[in-house]
Amino acid sequence: MDGNGRWAKSRGLPRKAGHRAGAETVREVSDACLELGIQYLTLYAFSSENWNRPQNEIDALMKLLEQFLKSKSKEFAKKNVRLQTIGRTHLLPESCRAELNRVIEETKNNTALTLILALSYGSREEITDATKAIAEKVQNGQITPSEINNQTLSNHLDSAPFPDPDLLIRTSGELRLSNFLLWQLSYAEFYITQKNWPDFGKKDFREAIENYARRQRRFGRVSSSK
Ligand code: IPE
Ligand code: MG
């Protein structure tokens, strides 16, 4: 969800206005998922590194998150959307955590789309936490080091309940992962768009999906048609 700041700057608006506009895009893109039958959407809403932004911007983002959650309950119920999170959400302000827990609980049986918010999320932190959890299990004798495989690591990530993403969409033209789902994106297809997140709409999302549908995924094998 990159480019909120640039979107605002190009209009002579405060960065906060860009984040507000970006929250609208969340609805556009999740509606597009529902229409296309895409069952999982993960949004990189706030990274571990975003804590280094000016305090007033952090406060604005947290307030926006809280408002977003408060305003979405009815819509999630109507559209059959389940809300989940990944990241060190215990670091979020208490008021945000309370709203998050409420909406997660309220939507836990919804089945059309799982909307996963990455909050206070960093992939290296996630892998580090998983490693610690596995190390503790080894220490307690629950597993032996030789039993550890790729699946063990996957099972200890925050993302354990969700499938690995098939497609990564990066807005605002940046060509980097920025500590996002490093493990889970191993075989994902990348789609880069110059559009800033607030300008990214349903049509753009559909274009990304059409582009993805034309890709040939080989997962390290030889193409079956050759
Ligand atoms: C992304 O937009 C939104 C969040 C990190 C919450 P940015 O704030 O990174 O926008 P740019 O990169 O300054 O344009
Ligand atoms: Mg940015």
Image: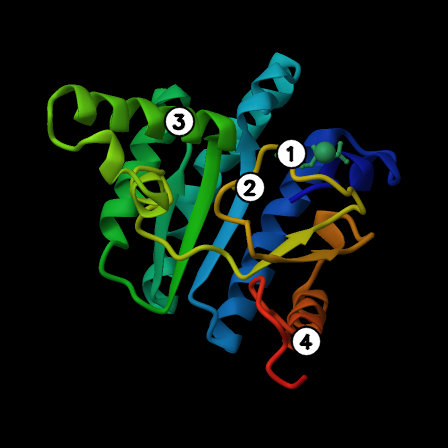
Residue 221 appears in which quarter of the rendering?
Answer: bottom right
Q: What element carries label 1?
A: loop
Q: What residue type is labelled 3?
A: Arg
The answer to whether the residue labelled 1 contacts the one labelled 2, judged by CB atoms less than 8 Å apart, is: yes
Give how far apart the Cα atoms at labels 2 and 4 are.
22 Å
* 2 or 4: tag closer to the N-terminus: 2
Cα separation between marks 2 and 3 = 13 Å
Q: Inspect this view and state whether residue 122 appears.
A: no
Question: CA separation, marks 1 and 2?
Answer: 10 Å
| Amino acid type, residue under disc 4 in the picture | Glu
At mark 4, the secondary structure is helix
- Which comes before the other along the chain, label 1 or label 2? 2
Corner quadrant of residue 18: top right
Q: What element carries label 3?
A: loop
Residue on which disc 1 sits: 178
For the N terminus, the quadrant is top right
* Other-residue count near label 1 (Cα within 10 Å), few / some / many at <14 / 14–19 / ≥20: few
Marks 4 and 1, the one that precedes in the sequence: 1
Q: Residue furthest left?
A: 141
**Residue count near mark 2 (Cα–Cα under 10 Å), binned few <14, some 14–19, many ≥20:** many
Q: Mark 4 points at which residue?
A: 210
CA separation in Å, label 4 and label 1: 25 Å
> Helix or strand or loop: what does disc 2 sit on?
strand
Q: Position of residue 60 (x, y in %)?
A: 58, 26
